[in-house]
Structures are given as structure tokens and as C-alpha cells.
Image (cartoon, rainbow, N blue to C red):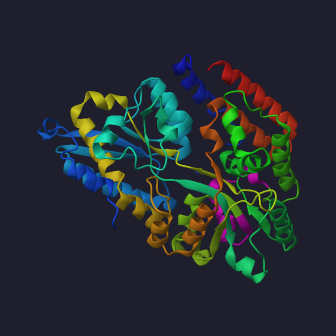
């Protein structure tokens, strides 16, 4: 059990400020809930007296306009179902919400009724402090409990404290026109990817689009590299002490990232660049490949955002070290919505939350999220069904990448404590800036890990 959680929450807020330079025939859940009768207690709905709940979301900016539209549609359905209900949408940037606003609200014990949250480690930490609503009975009543691909990151001691809105994988977006013009092939090994980057650089282009002002962006590359060099299982062992950050295989992985920086495979000055800058490097043709989450496909499929590059971007998995080795990919469903435990004390707010869940997590909405916004479903769905939902070429590449995965792992920040994440973020930015060597960086992270583990 964790000790002194509320002080730790305050520590998390402070730690963020230390970051340097700072992803049909099937029955759907809705129809099942209709078969089971009312979702909420009729007495809770008997009064039309006005009341309000807040939904904190992170659908901010043009790149998230489609998923915002889906959220607004669910809100309208929910308001129509629950007499007197008004839902206030509170839009906050994802990083600000995660590392500042929500942490402060949780430390004060006053989160909004519904909020965007990462399952691990945040939701689990907040659940330990009694601040998250247990959804287990609600999901059973709605017939949803066994519908999700995974609820692991939102589960604590057998209880469910949040729901993922979608799934994702990480891999390389690439300029298909450039590959065709230069007769380049999708790399099958990491050495082939390295040679490909060298050839692209020799042609005067940036091999990998990158922006490292926010450390989680370059860490997508680092995390995938170390999962090949050290194996995806290594990250699971850091919190238990079974794995060590300064393992020689981890040193090799960080050294590979450092080597790519020193070779000039990323844009000069990446530590000062924002996430949107990275995508613009692809859209303008300045860079040819970009490591990012599959969620970024919505930008490249939208002519308003991608311009003439729309429809000309493909996707492939980071290849293994050797030909024939298993394809290892970051694949998870760690971002979604959580609900304040205070909702349980107000029958009408609880009714609103139940209605919101019923309307949001349906097969129809998941497929629309896939088709309109390119978000992989969080509920179980046949791969062929996904293929037939979207005939977009980029989405078909992503479906192919999913089908090729032999081993998968969740993102590193779902498996380590927040203070370790902070140390890792500082470390990778120091590597990029040429301020530290891989072995020394990892020794420091291991020391932070040891301290964090001692508090478990």
C-alpha cells in the first residue's frame, strides 16, 4: 500500500514544474442496456429541478475537432435522458490537465464529476485515496464489463475506476510519395531503418520529425527502442525491483537514441519545438518519417490540416533488431474518463453518469470514432470489422500494423511512479542536449526508482 498519498499528490504537482524544457450482427452495449430495463433509479429522474455536472475533457484544437463533436453528441443525448440536467464542458489541454489542474483538484479532494484521466498511474493513485467512483456495478448493469479490450490500467483490487475512450499503437508515419520516388522499402530490421535514415539525410531531408520540448514525445522513440534491446517485459519490473534501469541492455537502447541525435537524424533545435511543430515537419515535406501514436492519423487524413500531404502518408511498425525476431509495439488503452466518488452521494448526478456511460461506450460510437477520427476501439471488435469501417489507406496501414504485432506493452508512464517519469523526462532531454551519457542518466533514474519503491 502507498503511504501518505495526499502529500505525494502535492509532490507530483511540484515535480512537474521541475521538467526541463517542458499521446451489424453483433449486439452493442446500448441495445443490451435497453433489454435490461432502466439504467438508473426512476426516483432519481422524477424531478426536473435543474442541476449541473461538469465534464473535463482535453479535446482542444483543430486536430481533435472530430472527437469533440462525438463528445458533444453524447452530451446532448445524456441531457435529453436525464430531466433537469445541464452538462458543462470544461476544455483543458491534455498535459495541463494531467500534470497540473487535475492533480491540484485531487489534492484538494474536489475533482469535477467527470474528467479526462490516465488509468495508470493516475487513476489508480486517486482511487487509493477514495476519490474515484467504483464503476463495477454500473458496468455489470449495462452489460459492459466484458466488452473492453482491456481495463487493466483502470483496475485496482478488482474494482474498475475509469474507462478508456480508445486504443492506440505507436509507430512510424512516413511520406509515401517520397518512398515511391526514391524506390525506398519499409525497413524490416532496425539496421535497415538506420540505413534508410542515412540515405534520407544524404538527400537533404530530415529522417525523423521530432519535437522534444515535451519529453513524452521523444520518449515514444526511446520506449520502443528499449523494448527491443531489453525486451518489453523489463518495464514491468522497475516498480518491483526485478528490473534495473541501468541494465546494460537499457544503456545500449539509450545509446542508440543518442547516436541518432548525434547523426543529425532529428531537426536541430528539437528541444525548443512543440508537438504541432513535429507534425508540420511531415506536412511540409521537411521530414520523411515520424514516430507517433496512431491517434495522429486524423491530422494526416484531413485536407484542412495536412493540405496537399493528405492521403500521402503511410504507417509502419518500428522493426525488430534482427529479421525474424517478433514485432514489439506499444499498444494500450490508458486514456479515458474517470468519475468523482462524490457522485455516489447524489442520486441525480449518479443517474447522469450512468446515462453518459451508456451513451458513450457503444459499438456505434466506437466505430464512428474509428471512422471519423481514426481512434482504435476500446471495446472488443473483430479486425475485419475495423477494416470494413474505414477504407482510408492510412487507416488500412494502421490495421495491418496491428495485425503484425507479436508482443505488445503499455507505455512506460503507465508502469512507473510519477517521480520516476519526471526523472526519465529530464534524462532524455539531457541526452538530446548532449549534457549526459546514457549510463549516468540511467544510474540517476535507478536511484529515483529505488526511493520511489521504498515508499510502496
| Residue extending farthest top | 4
Q: Residue at x 26, y 56 (%)?
A: 31
Instruction: Locate residue 4: give its quadrant.
Output: top right
Residue at 47%, 35% (x, y): give it: 155
Residue at far left of view: 46
Quadrant the N terminus occupies: top right
> Where are the magenta residues, as a range?
269-289
Q: Is residue 201 magenta?
A: no
Observer-nearest of 38 and 66: 38
Q: Residue at x 41, y 57 (%)?
A: 68
Q: Quadrant of the C terminus?
A: top right
Vertical side of 11 occupied by 210: above or below: below
Question: Viewer-proximal residue, 264 or 238?
Answer: 238
Is any part of residue 277 visible from this angle?
no
Residue 96 visible, this angle:
yes
Residue at the farthest bottom position: 181
The magenta stretch spans residue 271: yes
Q: How many marks?
A: 0
Left or right: 246 as drawn, with respect to 400: right
Tell me: residue 237, above or below residue 272.
Answer: above
Residue 127: % across, % down: 46, 28
Left or right placement of residue 427 versus residue 109 in this view: right
Q: Position of residue 436 (x, y in %)?
A: 86, 39
**Quarter assignment of residue 100:** top right
Q: Is 411 placed left or right of 362 in the picture? A: right
Going by the image, does 96 lie left or right of 43?
Answer: right
Give coordinates of residue 120: x percent, y percent. Answer: 55, 37
- Residue for point 53% across, 20% down: 5
Amino acid at each position: 500500500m502507498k503511504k501518505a498519498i495526499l502529500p505525494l499528490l502535492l509532490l507530483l504537482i511540484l515535480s512537474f514544474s521541475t521538467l526541463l524544457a517542458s499521446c451489424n450482427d453483433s449486439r452493442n452495449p446500448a441495445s443490451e442496456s435497453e433489454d435490461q430495463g432502466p439504467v438508473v433509479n426512476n426516483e432519481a429522474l422524477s424531478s426536473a429541478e435543474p442541476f449541473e455536472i461538469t465534464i473535463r475533457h482535453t479535446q482542444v484544437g483543430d486536430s481533435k475537432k472530430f472527437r469533440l463533436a462525438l463528445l458533444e453528441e453524447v452530451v446532448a443525448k445524456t441531457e435529453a435522458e436525464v430531466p433537469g440536467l445541464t452538462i458543462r464542458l470544461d476544455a483543458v489541454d491534455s498535459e495541463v490537465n494531467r500534470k497540473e489542474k487535475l492533480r491540484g483538484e485531487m489534492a484538494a479532494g474536489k475533482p469535477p464529476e467527470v474528467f479526462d484521466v490516465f488509468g495508470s498511474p493516475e487513476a489508480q493513485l486517486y482511487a487509493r485515496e477514495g476519490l474515484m467512483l467504483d464503476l463495477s456495478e454500473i458496468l455489470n448493469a449495462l452489460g459492459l464489463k466484458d466488452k473492453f479490450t482491456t481495463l487493466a490500467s483502470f483496475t485496482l483490487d478488482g474494482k474498475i475506476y475509469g474507462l478508456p475512450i480508445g486504443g492506440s499503437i505507436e509507430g512510424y508515419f512516413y511520406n509515401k510519395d517520397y518512398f515511391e520516388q526514391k524506390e525506398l522499402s519499409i525497413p524490416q530490421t532496425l539496421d535497415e531503418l538506420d540505413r534508410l535514415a542515412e540515405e534520407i539525410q544524404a538527400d537533404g531531408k530530415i529522417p525523423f520529425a521530432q519535437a522534444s520540448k515535451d519529453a513524452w514525445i521523444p520518449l515514444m522513440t526511446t520506449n520502443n527502442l528499449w523494448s527491443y534491446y531489453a525486451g518489453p517485459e523489463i518495464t514491468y519490473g522497475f516498480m518491483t525491483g526485478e528490473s534495473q534501469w541501468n541494465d546494460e541492455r537499457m544503456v545500449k537502447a539509450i545509446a542508440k537514441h543518442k547516436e541518432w541525435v548525434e547523426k543529425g537524424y532529428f531537426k536541430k533545435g528539437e528541444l525548443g519545438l512543440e508537438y504541432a511543430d513535429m507534425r508540420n515537419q511531415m506536412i511540409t515535406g521537411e521530414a520523411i518519417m515520424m514516430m507517433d501514436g496512431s491517434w495522429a492519423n486524423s491530422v494526416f487524413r484531413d485536407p484542412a490540416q495536412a493540405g496537399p500531404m493528405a492521403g500521402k502518408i503511410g504507417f509502419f511498425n518500428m522493426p525488430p533488431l534482427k529479421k525474424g525476431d517478433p514485432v514489439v509495439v506499444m499498444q494500450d488503452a490508458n486514456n479515458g474518463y474517470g468519475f468523482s466518488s462524490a457522485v455516489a452521494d447524489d442520486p441525480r448526478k449518479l443517474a447522469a453518469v450512468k446515462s453518459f456511460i451508456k451513451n458513450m461506450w457503444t459499438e456505434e460510437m466506437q466505430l464512428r470514432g474509428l471512422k471519423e477520427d481514426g481512434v482504435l476501439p476500446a471495446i472488443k471488435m473483430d479486425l475485419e470489422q475495423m477494416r470494413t469501417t474505414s477504407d482510408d489507406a492510412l487507416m488500412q496501414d494502421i490495421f495491418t500494423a496491428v495485425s503484425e504485432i507479436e508482443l505488445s506493452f503499455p507505455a512506460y508512464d503507465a508502469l512507473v511512479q510519477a517521480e520516476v517519469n519526471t526523472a526519465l523526462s529530464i534524462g532524455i532531454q539531457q541526452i538530446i542536449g548532449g549534457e549526459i551519457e546514457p549510463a549516468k542518466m540511467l544510474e540517476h533514474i535507478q536511484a529515483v526508482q529505488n526511493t520511489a519503491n521504498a515508499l510502496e
